[in-house]
Image: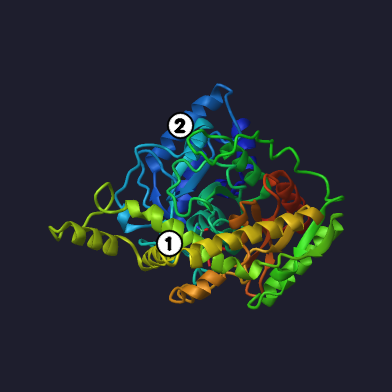
Amino acid sequence: MELSALSIHRAHELLKNKDISAVELTRAVLSRIAAVDDGIRAYLTVDADGALSAAGHADELIRQGRITPLTGIPVALKDLICTRGIGTTCGSRILENFVPPYDAHVVQRLRAENAVIMGKLNMDEFAMGSSTEHSAFIKTRNPWDQTRVPGGSSGGSAAAVAADMCLGSLGSDTGGSIRQPASHCGVVGMKPTYGRVSRFGLVAFASSLDQIGPFAKNVKDCALLLLAISGHDPADSTSVPRGVPDYSAGLSGDLSGLTVGLPREYFDTPGLSPDVAAAIENAVDTFTSLGAACVEVTLPHTDYAVAAYYVIAPCEASSNLARYDGVKYGFRDNSESDLMQMYNNTRSIGFGAEVQRRIIIGTYALSAGYYDAYYKKASQVRTLIIDDFNTAFETCDLLLSPTAPTPAFKIGETVDDPLAMYLSDVFTLSANLAGIPGISVPCGFSTEGLPIGLQLMGPHFSEEILLKAAYCFEQAAGVCNRKPNLNK
Ligand code: GLN
């Protein structure tokens, strides 16, 4: 087996037994990137030197018997997670030359475990999008079918894991940007509870919705990465001071005693592909055979989630992105001497069309006279959506649904139709509005051989239950073992 195809757990065993070295493993991943990333285009930056020197250091520690689960493991990061000394573009021209002087909290955590950071992964500009086509630099392709998108906005993070160009990765999820690309690329992706993982050093899109989370080849690896990045950080005032359980510990047994809610609105959605519906139905049978009781529940305000999200997220974005003015840092257009014109040109040239659209929508919805009609109304709807979840969780432990209404769509198919793109987030946005955790785990394939993901959502801080349910399902369904054939 190619070393780059290893799971984190398996690689850890081999490293621990000194059957392989971290340098060998890192070289194998670099060769894999060299072999397939011309086609997939997941990486914006590959830090080969940094990775090899971190791997050398990891080998030294392993020789001294100082190994933790991530020591010497090659991982990669979505390019909006700040990395000291390594460019962090957010997929945007406006930050094309930005090199952060500090590491994000999650990066500090990974470095403390001596994980090997391979580089930075492509994304929709400022994480706005569902296909990674809004990157200012490259279009990432889906490893299962290179005419299709990998999903987004963390498309590079999902594609890199699916194509064995890292053993695990981190992305961010504001409205589905971890779960949806995980579903489209046939890997596991998890959005933790809001406040579980520090956002310090995560470039902000919509601060009340953003959360960093892991992508992995299987649920066990996902649990390991989540454990490594979770926990309180005084540098993020929304990070919750609460203990972190050992997420790997509960991954065994069956699901007897568990009540799984099937939200009616998520199954009645127009546009739900028959292949996805069939895969999810099979998954429900698997949950039942594992001992779970599956019951129908209702989330009556689901219909309003897309509208509420696409007011709240742009409002927060318009405020967060005001800092890119050509004065403080990042790109500046110097063609005019007039200050106002400099602002205008900088932002018109520096931001792509989707980001400009969001800034305009957000600025409009927050402006005097419209605030009550849009932002306030959307915030009220958000409360109703939170209430829906609270009511549902009175009768079930977690919710099961499709992650996305269709498998990965073709490159170019929806990029000029923002509304169609926004509607593809219908199953994932609500979890962000409510701050609850969600995981996407592969559950089958379409008739065209494209991966389909199953989403599980649970109450705040129910990551342990979600991971256990996802793990038991994964073991029973056996879908994770299939790999895309990149040699076609
Ligand atoms: N697709 C959604 C958007 O464009 C979600 C993005 C995300 O989660 N970062 O806003």
Q: Nearer the viewer, residue 157 or 305?
A: 305
The local secondary structure at tag 1 comes to helix
Residue 44 drawn at (x, y percent): 39, 54
**What is the three-letter code of the residue carrying label 2?**
Gly
Residue 42 can be seen in this image: no
Q: Nearer the viewer, residue 29 or 150?
A: 150
Q: Is mark 1 within 8 Å of ligand 1?
A: no
Question: Residue at (40%, 59%) from the top-left corner?
Answer: 125
Alpha carbon separation for disc pair 2 and 1: 51 Å
Residue 482 drawn at (x, y percent): 66, 59
Question: Residue at (45%, 73%) from the top-left corner?
Answer: 415
Q: Nearer the viewer, residue 469 or 433?
A: 433
10 Å crowding of disc 1: few (<14), some (14-19), many (20+):
many
Q: State the image quarter where residue 63 is shown.
A: top right
- 352 to the left or right of 72: left
- Compared with residue 283, is residue 291 higher up or lower down, i.e. above or below? above
Residue 298 drawn at (x, y percent): 75, 66
Residue 193 can be seen in this image: yes
Question: Residue at (65%, 50%) from the top-left corner?
Answer: 218
Q: State the image quarter where residue 480 is shown.
A: bottom right
* Label number found at residue 366: 1
10 Å crowding of disc 2: few (<14), some (14-19), many (20+):
some
The local secondary structure at tag 2 comes to helix
Marks 2 & 1, CB-CB < 8 Å contact: no
Residue 278 drawn at (x, y percent): 74, 72
- Compared with residue 11, is residue 261 higher up or lower down, i.e. above or below? below
Q: Nearer the viewer, residue 358 or 282?
A: 358
Disc 2: which residue: 56
**What is the three-letter code of the residue carrying label 1?**
Leu
Specify which label sits upstream in the sequence, 2 or 1.
2
